[in-house]
Amino acid sequence: MNTANQTKTWKEKLHEIIYEADTPSGKLFDVVLLVLILASIVLVMLESVKNIDAKYHNALYIGEWIITIFFSIEYILRIITVKKPFKYIFSFYGILDLLSTIPMYISFVFAGSHALVTLRALRLLRVFRILKLARYLGASNQLRDSIIASRVKILVFLFAVLVSSVIFGTIMYLVEGEENGFTNIPKSVYWCIVTLTTVGFGDIAPQTALGQFITTIIMILGYGIIAVPTGIVSAEYSRNMKKSDDEKLKTTEPKINLNTQRCSNCHENNHDDDAYFCKVCGNNLH
Amino acid sequence: MNTANQTKTWKEKLHEIIYEADTPSGKLFDVVLLVLILASIVLVMLESVKNIDAKYHNALYIGEWIITIFFSIEYILRIITVKKPFKYIFSFYGILDLLSTIPMYISFVFAGSHALVTLRALRLLRVFRILKLARYLGASNQLRDSIIASRVKILVFLFAVLVSSVIFGTIMYLVEGEENGFTNIPKSVYWCIVTLTTVGFGDIAPQTALGQFITTIIMILGYGIIAVPTGIVSAEYSRNMKKSDDEKLKTTEPKINLNTQRCSNCHENNHDDDAYFCKVCGNNLH
Amino acid sequence: MNTANQTKTWKEKLHEIIYEADTPSGKLFDVVLLVLILASIVLVMLESVKNIDAKYHNALYIGEWIITIFFSIEYILRIITVKKPFKYIFSFYGILDLLSTIPMYISFVFAGSHALVTLRALRLLRVFRILKLARYLGASNQLRDSIIASRVKILVFLFAVLVSSVIFGTIMYLVEGEENGFTNIPKSVYWCIVTLTTVGFGDIAPQTALGQFITTIIMILGYGIIAVPTGIVSAEYSRNMKKSDDEKLKTTEPKINLNTQRCSNCHENNHDDDAYFCKVCGNNLH
Amino acid sequence: MNTANQTKTWKEKLHEIIYEADTPSGKLFDVVLLVLILASIVLVMLESVKNIDAKYHNALYIGEWIITIFFSIEYILRIITVKKPFKYIFSFYGILDLLSTIPMYISFVFAGSHALVTLRALRLLRVFRILKLARYLGASNQLRDSIIASRVKILVFLFAVLVSSVIFGTIMYLVEGEENGFTNIPKSVYWCIVTLTTVGFGDIAPQTALGQFITTIIMILGYGIIAVPTGIVSAEYSRNMKKSDDEKLKTTEPKINLNTQRCSNCHENNHDDDAYFCKVCGNNLH
C-alpha cells in the first residue's frame, strides 16, 4: 500500500480522509464529524429553551456558526475531492449534507428557519459506517427482507385503518357534535386515529353515552388489529431467519464487505479489501 | 375480439366501461370514479370546518351536488346495463353505491345527514380492483385464513375482556364513586375498557389510593393479555405460511385470476382471460 | 334410554334439567338462565345511571327482585337435586352462584352493596357449555398450555416490571416533588406503571426537564419490554401448535367429550355419551 | 457432612447461614432478610404519604432505623465471614448492599435522601436464589439468548426511534409554537416520544390542523414500528426454543446447579451437591 501511497496528490489524500474510515486520520475525521453533529443538535435544542437562550445567547450563536462554517468547508471539500462531483451532490448523502448546512444561511432571510438545523440528526446515520454495524445488519438483511415481503400486506392494513378512521370519525362527529370538542370531521378523524392507535391524549374525549359506546368498539378494534402487523412481521422474519439458517448449512460463510473505501472517480464503495483499482471505472483507489 | 366487438350494442359497450377495467376506457372510468370519491370526501370534510365553510360555502355546495349527480347517473347506468339488475341492486357494492348517493337527497329533509356522504370512503375498496392487488392478496389468502383459524379463540378472548371490564368497572364505581367521575356503572365499564386497552384518555382517572391500586392491576392485566391475540395470529399465520411454502414445492404455480370482466347477464366475474362467453349463463362477454 | 327414564324421580328429572344441556328442557333452562343473568346486569347498570333511576326506579327495583328470587329458587333446587350438596356448595360454580344471589339481600343492611350483583357476569362463563365451545377450546388446549409453559417466565417479567416501577417511581418523586403532582411514593409508583404500560392518563405528568428526560427512558423501556411477553407467548404457542400438528399425523382423532351429563351423586361430569352409570360412584345417570 | 461440621469455626458457621440457603438456618436467614427488605420499602413509601406520616412519624422513623441497623450489621458480618472481603465489596451484590444501607446515614446530612432506601427493592432479586427459580431460568436461558441475539437490531431500532423523534419534534415545534405548549425543542422531542410509544399523556396536544395531521403520521408510525421489536424477539426466541428442543433429543438432561453453597475464601458459588472442597481454591466448604 505504501508504494501506491507515494504517488498520491493532496486531493486523493483528502478523499481518503473524508470519504473513508480505514486509515487512522479517516477514522478521526468521522468521529470529529459525529461529535460536531451531536453538538450542533444540542446547541439548537438549548437555544430554543427561553431561559437558557436569554443567558447564553451569544455563546450558542457563535457555536452554531463555527459548526456551520466547518460543515460548509467539509461540503465544499467533498465536492472538490470527488472526480464526478454531480454524482455526490445528487446522492442521498449529498442532498442531506447540503440540507443540514444551509438552514443557518437561510435564517438571515427567514427568522426561525435555523431550527431545521436538527435535520443534521439524519447525518448521524453515518455512525453505522464507523461502528461497522453493517456487519450485523448487512450480512443477513433478514429484517429488511421481512418488511419488504410484508410491504403490500402492511399497506392494505394501513389503508383499512384509514378508511375505518374516516367512517368512525364522521359517526362520532354526528353523535358528539361541536359542543363536546368534535368541532369538525377532520378533527374527529384525527381523534379516531388517536384512539385506534391506543395513544389517547384525552384533549378530546366522548361525553355522551352513545359516543362512549362507539369509542369502546373503536378501542377494542384497535387493540385487536395491532396483532395483525405484529403477527405478519414476526412470521415473515421467522421464515427469513430459517431460510438463512438452512443456507448456512449448505454454503460457506458469505463474504461480508467491511471495507469503507470509496472511488474518488465514480463514487463506487463496494470494493474488496485487496482491491487496488476501482472495479467499476478502473480508477486507482490508493 | 374485434369480430365480437362489431355486434356490440351501446348497452354492452357501457357495461364494459362501467364494470370492467381491462379496456383503456374502462380503466379511465375507474380512475375518474376514485378521484371523484376522494374529492367528495374531502369536500364534506372541509364543509364541516366552520371558517372554511363560511368562506366557500357555495363552491363546496355546488361541488358536492355535481359529484352526487354524477354518482346518481352512474348508479342508474349500472342498473340499466346489467341484464339482471336486482342481482346488482342487492349485492354488497349495489347497496354501497346507493347508500353513498342518497344522503345528499335526504339532506333536504334532515339537516346534517349529508355528512354520511363519507360512507363513500367504503367505495374506495374498489381501488383494489384497479391496482390488481388481488394478485398479492388473493393468491395466498394466508392472512384471512389465519384470522378465520383463530376466530373462536379471539372471540373467547374478547368475551373474557368484556366480562372482566364489567366486574372491574363495578368495583371501581363502588371504590371511587360519583365525586371522582365514576358517575355510573356503564361509564365505569367504559373507563375500564379505556384502561385495559392502554388508550388512557385521562378524562376520568382514579383519585383514591385504593382506586389507583386496582387500576394498577387492570393496567398490568391489559399489558399482559395484549400478548395473547398477537401470539395467536403470529403462530397461525406462521403455520399457514409454512403450509403454503410446502404446497408450492409440490404443485405448480396456481392460476391467479386478474381478469376484471363481468357478465352483463348474471353478474359473474370469475372469467378466464380467453373466455368469450360467460361460463355460468353462456352470455357473450364481448 | 326410555327404559331408564321410567324409573326417574322428580329429583332426577330436575337434576337433568338444571345441570345438563342435552335434553330440550335442559337446553331451554340454560338459555333462560343466561338471558336472566344478562338482564340483571343491565338492570343494575341502568339503576346506577341517575336520570334513568329517577324515572324508572320502581320498575328496575321490582325487576331486580324478580330475578334475585328466581336465582334463589334455582340455587336451592341445585342443592336439593344433588345427592352430595356440599360438594356443589363448595365448588367454583356453587360459590359463584351464592355470591351472585346474596348481594340483593345484603343491600337491606348495607346500601349500595347490591351493585355487586354484576358479579353475575362471571356466571356467563356457563355460556361455553351451551355453545359447546369446549369442542374448539378443549380439544387442543394449545393456548392454555402455552400460558402455563411460559408462566414462570411471565411472573419473572412482571416481577422485573414491579421492581423497576418502585425504583423509577421513587426517583420521579425526588425529581418532581409534591408541587408537580407526585405527592408521595405510592402515587409515583402508580404513575410509573401508568407510563410503563403505555396507558398514560395524563392526570399526573412530569413538569421539570429532568423529570421529562427520565420519563422518556421509562416510556422507551415500556415500549421495548412489551415485546418480551408477546414473544414468549407467540413462540410457546407456535411450538404447541406444531406439536399437536405432529401428533395428529401419528394418532387418530382424539375423543372429545361434548356430553354435559353430570352425576347427581358425586357431581362428576366427564361421562361418555353411552354411559348409563357414573364411572366414579356407579350412580344411575338417567 | 457432620464430620466436616465438627471442625467449623463460628466464622464458617455464619458464612453458611448468611451466604447459603441449603441449611434450615440459612433458609430462615434469607426469608427474614426478604421480609425486612419488603418492610423497609413499605415504611419509606408510607412515610412519604403526608397524613400517614403526620400520625405515625415516630413509629415509622424507629422502624426504619431498626431495619437499617440490622442491614448494617449484616453488611459487616458479610465482610468479616468472607476470606477475601474486597471481592465481595466490589461485587454486584456487595455494592447493592452498601447502597441500600447508607441512605439513612446520609439523610443526617441531606434531608430527603433517605427515600433512596427504596433501592433496597433491587435486593429483592435475591428472591430468585431461595425460590430456586434458577432451575427454570438457568437451565434454558432461551429468553436471555434471544435478547442478546437481537441486541444490535434492537439498538438500531431504538436509534431510529430517537432520530425520528428529534426530527418530528423540531417540526412540531415550528408548526405548533410556544402558544400551544410546544415551548422548546427538547419538550417537543419529549412529546414526540410520548406519542410514538402510544403513551399519550395529553398534557401537551397539537391544536393546529397541520400539527394534528403530522401527529397522525407519528402515531401510525409508532403503531406500525412496535411490530418490529416484537417480531424480532418472537422469532429469535422461537429459534432458540427449537434449537434447545433439538438438543434435548440428542443429549441427556443437562446437570442443573441448584446448590447455593459459596466458598468463604474465593466467593465461588458454582459447586456440585457432593463437593466438600472448593473447586477453585481448595478451601473446605463445610
Image (tube, coloured by chain):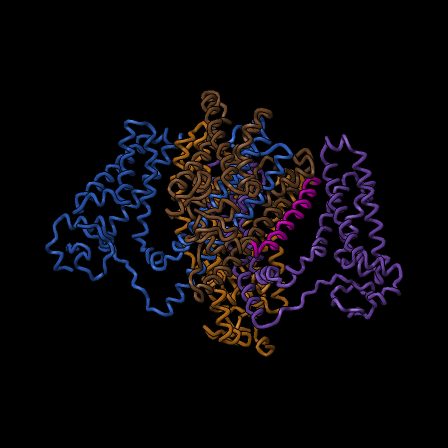
Chain colours: A blue, B brown, C purple, D orange
Q: Residue at x 38, y 69 (%)?
A: A249
x and y, in percent, of residue A159 in the image: 47, 43
**Vertical side of A267 occupied by C85: above or below:** below
Residue D88 visible at all? no
Q: Nearer the viewer, residue D148 or C1?
A: C1
x and y, in percent, of residue B241 in the image: 48, 59
**Quadrant the C terminus of chain D occupies:** bottom right
Residue D211 visible at all? yes
**Quadrant the N terminus of chain D occupies:** bottom right
Residue D134 in which image quadrant: bottom right
Tell me if B49 is positioned left or right of C264 in this view: left
Any magenta on residue B150? yes
- Residue projecting furthest to the bottom: D3
- Residue projecting furthest to the left: A7
Q: Nearer the viewer, residue D45 or A121?
A: A121
Q: Residue at x 67, y 68 (%)?
A: C255
Q: Nearer the viewer, residue D217 or A259?
A: D217
Q: Residue at x 52, y 40 (%)?
A: A164
x and y, in percent, of residue B99 in the image: 56, 35
Name the dominant secondary structure of the magenta segment.
Answer: helix
Residue D112 in which image quadrant: top right
Tell me if A203 is positioned left or right of A74 in this view: right
Write the start and end of the magenta stretch as one range: B148-174
